[in-house]
Amino acid sequence: MQPYPNFGVNLTVDELLSLRQQASVLDLASKYNVSSTLAGGYRSKFRGRGMDFDEVRLYQPGDDIRNIDWRVTARTGKAHTKLFKEERERPVFILLDQSPNLFFGSKNAFKSVIAARAVALLVWACINAGSRIGGVLFDDKNHLEHRPSGRRKEALSFLKKLTERHNRVIERINSGTINVAQSAESSFEQSLGRLRRLAKPGSLIYLFSDFTQMSKDAQRHLGQLCRHNDIQAYLLTDPLDHHLPPSGYYSVTDGQQVGRINTGEGQMQERYFKSYQQRLDDLNTIFKQQKILFQELTTSDDLAIVLAAANTPRVISR
């Protein structure tokens, strides 16, 4: 039974608060070994410039020359570089897209709600681990920056802001004062620019979006961010993004106009699927080039399992 009539459409702070228990059940330090991705009372298995020496290996193109181990290099005659385990104090940042086109879902909840729940899980996981978490929220009109903090009070403030902004977009959609089919192309790009100023080197960054605004400038910001940070990108999708519904006539609307489509017409089903796959391939290529973990997050997923599995060191270690 749903907690309230608009569950999965509107957000409540109580819903996001309730996820704290689920975040603790994840047991980030054991079953999925997720704790190594977050800051707090544990040692991370990610490698980078940190306090604790890990090992020496052969120098590889792109390694920081400041980390060359000259003793081993002189002894072996081959360049070797030092590797370090990450420092325990590792801030976590979230970039959350609340653009109108994410306010859609055919199963369980809107994409925007799924993204908010995923963010809440990460927020509580960080607070439970004693980590600092901050982020940038954006929609088609506004941006909101939240400075990193490990205090429960600040985490609650972050989730309240997220909830208020989400429901405000819903109100604008319902009142017809927003066009779901349009959003400012620069929003994602500008948010990444803000994140560059906010996130310090060595941070762990999560991106939640449909990435429809992946401009060249946005890719440039990503390139700068991933030089000194670990980034995970989550593509918000719905089953209807992958496949059209069974052949037949359907009414569709963008909130202002209504039309009808025949999903059984010609090769529409196949063309639709291929178009989505091409977009997925393009995003895969972009994120792979930047060495960013890329993961789909659908409205039918178990969020805790997806986030836990994606955060294992064996997946994102480079």
Image (cartoon, grey):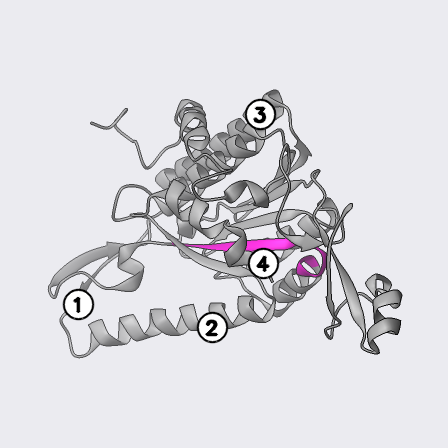
Q: Earlier in the sequence, mark 3 or mark 2?
A: 3
Q: Quadrant of the C terminus?
A: bottom right
Q: Position of residue 79 (x, y in %)?
A: 81, 74
Frontmost residue, 315 versus 213? 315
Q: Which residue is mark 2?
A: 282
Q: Which residue is mark 1?
A: 263
SS at mark 1 in the image: loop
Q: Which residue is mark 4?
A: 317
Residue 157 - label: 3
Residue at 41% across, 68% down: 280
Q: Earlier in the sequence, mark 3 or mark 1?
A: 3
- Up-down relation of residue 61 to residue 237 (above or below): below
**Picture quadrant of residue 43:** top right
SS at mark 2 in the image: helix
Question: Which amino acid type corresponds to the residue marked 2 in the rendered image?
Answer: Asp
SS at mark 3 in the image: helix
- 205 vs 33, left or right, is right
Q: Earlier in the sequence, mark 3 or mark 4?
A: 3
